Amino acid sequence: MATLSAILETTDFEKVAGGLLFTEGPLWHPEGFFYFVDIRGNVLCRVTPGLPHEVVRTTEGGNGTTFDLQGRLINCEGAGRRVTRTELDGTVVTLVDHFEGKRLNRPNDVICRSDGTLFFTDPGLRVPLAERELDNACIYRINPDDTVAEVGPFEYPNGLALSPDERTLYVANTRWTQYIHAVELNEAGEMSNRRIFADMSAEGTNGVPDGMKVDVEGRVFCTGTDGTWVFSPDGALIGIIETPELCANIAFGGPDMQTLLFTASTSVYTLRVKTPGLPHPWYG
């Protein structure tokens, strides 16, 4: 089994942005920059390595991000209880904010499959009981025809990632028992089975299972206690990448997809790795 030294090109972090409130939602754009959000600052930002970060627009608690197959930015805006899409002309529209006539809880993370299906998590714990309209915390999918369907209820679904063959959807469970679910999907994006992929329970309060990404070898990178945990495709723990600050999410990027970006509390860091991350299907 690989070790962290076989995965990391260096252990020297580069700080590429700082002075923020709580960073999240990292995403590489092939034009040469990363998007990220400052949840508590309610802004979407972008940073080009070597240059100061800049604010793109305000959000309503913007969190997880992805692109659709047209390169339009998709953003979970938890405080707004919606998933938004930024059109190519910069217009922001609500993609979904209700399911079966009931308001979403607090959309958290979102990913795109190669057929254009979007999957997003909707945990409910942080919504006061009197304001909840949906009983369960769930994962939903937005089909290519814009219809919305439930994938299934989960305890506290947070970060999402797909395996290289897109048959497995990884789900980080953040509260209570801390673990990663492996959800088997059929071609329609429906759940056919699920199992515990990895136990992430640990003593300490400096991080929980949250943002996830997968590299081309099928290894799963998930933020957690003490840093970013790296698992082999069979769920065995390879090691933990300790970050300078508590880390909530990660993204692969750079022209070779071998720059790993960490949204870590008040800052954003990068670290070079030896194996590329899975590219977004929009990248081609």
Image: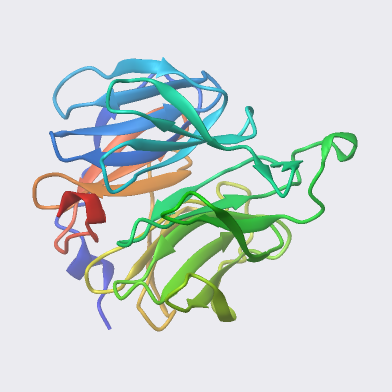
> Does the rendering let one see residue 82?
yes
x, y percent for residue 10: 16, 52
x, y percent for residue 38: 46, 25
Answer with left or right where residue 140 lies relative to residue 155. left
Q: Up-down: is 240 above or below 66?
A: below
Of residue 144 and residue 250, the one placed in the foreground of this image is 144
Name the residue: 55% across, 48% down.
207
Q: Which image quadrant is residue 155 in?
A: bottom right
Answer with left or right where residue 120 lies relative to residue 103. left
x, y percent for residue 29: 21, 38
Residue placed farthest to the right in the image? 130
Q: Which image quadrant is residue 212 in?
A: bottom left
Q: Quadrant of the N terminus?
A: bottom left
Of residue 192 and residue 102, the one placed in the foreground of this image is 102
Answer with left or right where residue 54 lies relative to residue 160. left
Q: Quadrant of the C terminus?
A: bottom left
